[in-house]
Structure formats: structure tokens, C-alpha cells
């Protein structure tokens, strides 16, 4: 039952706990907590409230946890922490898109991705991302429950 729950969370793009999110590494908005109803911008105080509220009200969130599908030669060996990159037009250059947070069963996973790189890759016909040091592709997906 736990494996089914974990696979369901990963398919929806919902990370959980310090193993998947790290401790103190990601902001509440990067973890999609506002879309999950875990943050209130109308009441209370909490540690880190000002930067979170500022980012929320300006609408500037550059990175988010996203569900991803892993495929290709070394996808079974994918590990949390693998750097993900976008290949640049034919020159062999690549630039950072984020990092893999979870490599789950059946090629599903979670990644912390820069939206400027991941959203074009998630569009229909978009080129997938790739692992920087292993041979596998990463196709991000925008969850239906995300804010616009």
C-alpha cells in the first residue's frame, strides 16, 4: 500500500518529507505548498514568511518540484541528485535545468527544475531534458492542479 501511495504522489508531483525535499534546501513555493493549501497569506507568522510572501505576490517563482518520466539507457540507475540539463542546438553545449530529487519505480520521479527550462520541455513536442553525467532522458510534466 505504501508503494502505491508513493507512486501516486510522484505521478501527481507531490514531494514529501526530508528524504525527498531535503532539510532547509527548498522554499515553500518551490515545493508547491501554496497550491496544496498548506500556506495562508492572510494569517499567522512563520519562519521565512517575508521572502515567501514577496515571491507569491510578485508571481516570481523560478523553480518548482515537478513530476518527471525517466527513459533511456541508464534510467534504471538514475539517482537523487543527478544534474539535469537542456541540450543546446547542435553545438553540444548544455545548460543546467535542475536536479533529480527522486527516481521512483517504473521510470517516474520528481525533480527540482528551473521553469524557464522545464516548461518548454514539458510542452507537446518539446525536447526532453537529459542527465548531465548519465545516459537517460527526463520528460517533465505540468500537473493539472498547479497554479496558472
Image (spheres, grey):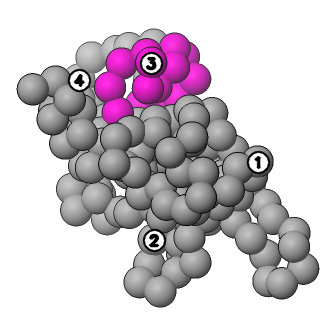
> Are circles 3 and 2 on residues that touch, CB within 8 Å?
no
In percent of width and height, residue 118 lies at 54, 63
Residue at the spot 38% in from the left edge and 63% down from the top edge: 141
Q: Nearer the viewer, mark 1 or mark 2?
A: 1
Q: Nearer the viewer, mark 4 or mark 2?
A: 2
**Which structural element holds mark 4?**
loop
Spatial CA distance of label 3 from label 1 is 22 Å
In percent of width and height, residue 20 lies at 44, 26
Q: Is residue 141 visible?
A: yes
Residue farthest left in this picture: 1
> Are circles 4 and 3 on residues that touch, CB within 8 Å?
no
Residue 19 tag number: 3
- Disc nearer the start of the sequence (3/2): 3
- Disc nearer the start of the sequence (1/4): 4
30 or 89: which is nearer to us?
89
In percent of width and height, residue 90 lies at 83, 84
Q: Which quadrant, please, contains the C terminus?
A: bottom left
- Disc nearer the start of the sequence (4/3): 3
7 relative to 92, above or below: above
> Are circles 4 and 2 on residues that touch, CB within 8 Å?
no
Q: Give the residues in magenta.
A: 15-28
20 or 79: which is nearer to us?
79
Spatial CA distance of label 4 from label 3 is 29 Å
Q: Which residue is mark 1?
A: 133
Q: Which residue is mark 4?
A: 43
Spatial CA distance of label 3 from label 2 is 25 Å
Residue at the spot 42% in from the left edge and 31% down from the top edge: 28
Mark 1, Cα crowd under 10 Å, few <14 / some 14-19 / many 20+, is: few
Spatial CA distance of label 4 from label 2 is 35 Å
> Are circles 1 and 4 on residues that touch, CB within 8 Å?
no
Q: Is residue 26 magenta?
A: yes
- Disc nearer the start of the sequence (1/2): 2
Amino acid at each position: 500500500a505504501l508503494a502505491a501511495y508513493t507512486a501516486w504522489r510522484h505521478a501527481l508531483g507531490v514531494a514529501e518529507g526530508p528524504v525527498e525535499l531535503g532539510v532547509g534546501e527548498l522554499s515553500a513555493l518551490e515545493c508547491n505548498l501554496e497550491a496544496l493549501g498548506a500556506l495562508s497569506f492572510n494569517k499567522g507568522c512563520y519562519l521565512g514568511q517575508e521572502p515567501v510572501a514577496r515571491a507569491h505576490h510578485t508571481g516570481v517563482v523560478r523553480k518548482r518540484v515537478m513530476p518527471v518520466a525517466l527513459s533511456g539507457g541508464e534510467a534504471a540507475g538514475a539517482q537523487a541528485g543527478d544534474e539535469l540539463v537542456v541540450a543546446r542546438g547542435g553545438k553540444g553545449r548544455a545548460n543546467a535545468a535542475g536536479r533529480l530529487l527522486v527516481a521512483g519505480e517504473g521510470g517516474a520521479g520528481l525533480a527540482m527544475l528551473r521553469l524557464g527550462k522545464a516548461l518548454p520541455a514539458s510542452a507537446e513536442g518539446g525536447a526532453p531534458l537529459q542527465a548531465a553525467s548519465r545516459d537517460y532522458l527526463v520528460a517533465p510534466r505540468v500537473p493539472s492542479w498547479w497554479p496558472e
